[in-house]
Image: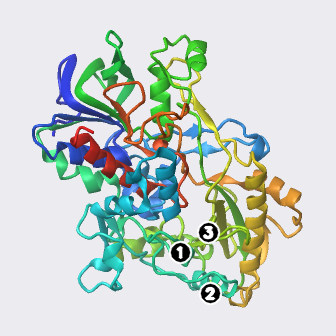
Amino acid sequence: MSDNNKAQGHVEQFDYIIVGAGTAGCLLAKRLSADPNNRVLLIEAGGRDNYHWIHIPVGYLYCIDNPRTDWRFRTEPDPGLNGRSLIYPRGKTLGGCSSINGMLYIRGQARDYDQWAEITGEDAWTWDNCLPDFMRHEDHYRLDAGGDADPDHDKYHGHGGEWRVEHQRLKWKVLEDFAEACVESGIPRTRDFNRGDNEGVDYFEVNQRSGWRWNASKAFLRESEKRSNLTLWHSTHVLGLETDTTGGEPRCTGVRVERAGKGEQIAQAAREVILSAGAIGSPQLLQLSGIGPADLLKAHNIPVVLDLPGVGENLQDHLQIRSVYKIQGATTLNTMANSLIGKARIGLEYLLTRSGPMSMAPSQLCLFTRSSEEYPYANIEYHVQPLSLDAFGQPLHPFPAITASVCNLNPTSRGTVRIRSADPKEAPAIAPNYLSTPEDRKVAADSLRVTRRIASQPAFSKYQPEEYKPGVQYQTDDELTKLAGDIGTTIFHPVGTTRMGRADDAMAVVDPHLRVRGMKGLRVVDAGIMPTITSGNTNSPTLMIAEKAARWILEND
């Protein structure tokens, strides 16, 4: 593979250009370059993933809001959050968000994908037809030699693929008792969240290999970078898409970039340009290139190449509401890491065994359940941690505590991503509009009550839990809803801003095969194409989307 500093010339020719070397882009690069006749260019604005904290699981704490690895976006002041603005991390390095995320392997629910098929009119998006695309790149630990897979496990999981899935390397007594409290409150145990119905409680499975983060760069680029037909330009900012409007339907012909130390340059694509810049980056680039809502483009003096009103609309995200419980008689990270000696022990354990708290994903215990009986399926997800802090980036509390964060899996609130100017270096305005619907506010209030119900069960009450946040004084729907606005934070799952849809759907940006409507030679392949957010973490569904898209692209479909 040609590296960033080897390619020369003002205009370079390729067959396929992939914008964004994140979760989707890395997989696409490997699949498309498997044919030596395909000349593939992969472009990444960030640098190589050689920062040590990327690879140590707990290092996400040092990667998020770090300019080396994160775009450091912020949301607009949000009325649903009582005027607060949130940090909005997006990966800025090879591997993209897979280099800074929580490493949690969750696919969502079968009904998510069946809904996509109904919305788009394309049966390829049903759960049954998406399952092989999840399995193709999977390498699930339970199918290892000597693994504990049940007889049906290989019907739902793959083995030998690039994307490693492992169990977490440590357990916590207090979390196991919290899980038992879930059972006492009517939530079943499960061994597998990824067979179509994820209701239940268990530890998260994680994208790690032997205690190291397993990101998309390691999984899909490390071997394929040896291919002579794959070129990587990292530290390269895409300024805009090149389009040809002289014929009938406009065509995307390439990209204009700014390369580190080389200035501006044009790369041309003989077949396709594929945007995999994510649910924030892809709509931003489309708008900068004159593809998007005409009124928005005209307001920034950008010539309208294609009026697509849905570009940057339909933003969906998961908002988590954190409950912190002080407890007695339990070991938590708060108490383990509250001294230099404790921190040294943690570091030594990781050095010697690749285990202990430094191998932790941000969340350990997972449960999916219902906020109320009116839902026939699990509509809320918990991330439970043996630690607590006032806010992300703040020090751990000096007392033993756990955090139970709950999010609405299927929010009805919709937000926007819109450019602020024609300057490609200026961050877009991100307005998620959290808690802007009555349904979302009700689910928020009800989910806090579910947390309290679990915490009151015998298995957990033996720790004498004290609700430190939000506080038992908040009881009514109005009080709990306002409180959710005060303490809610994103869990970094933006989707939907370039959503797919039927031909008669005026707000659809791409067709069911992810081709930009009204523009030849251009696709979007990332989480932005989701018409509705998945009922769980969004990284693995993005890989599935890329797997499916790669096949369509190679088939020239």
Crowding near pointer 2: few (<14 within 10 Å), some, many (20+)? Answer: many
Observer-nearest residue: 47 or 322?
A: 322
Crowding near pointer 1: few (<14 within 10 Å), some, many (20+)? Answer: some
Type of the residue with mark 1: Gly
Q: Could you give the CA–CA distance between mark 3 and mark 2, rounded to whole angstroms?
A: 18 Å
Q: Which residue is pictured at 72% across the width and 84% down the height? A: 328
Q: Could you give the CA–CA distance between mark 1 and mark 3, rounded to whole angstroms?
A: 39 Å
Q: Which residue corresponds to mark 1?
A: 342
Identify the element where label 2 is drawn.
Answer: helix
Q: Which circle marks residue 378 in the picture?
A: 3
- Do the residues under discs 2 and 1 have CB atoms within 8 angstroms? no
* Numbered marks: total: 3
Q: Which circle marks residue 180 in the picture?
A: 2
- Do the residues under discs 1 and 3 have CB atoms within 8 angstroms? no
Q: Is residue 340 left or right of residue 195?
A: right
Would you say residue 50 is visible in this rendering? Answer: no
Observer-nearest residue: 254 or 48?
A: 254
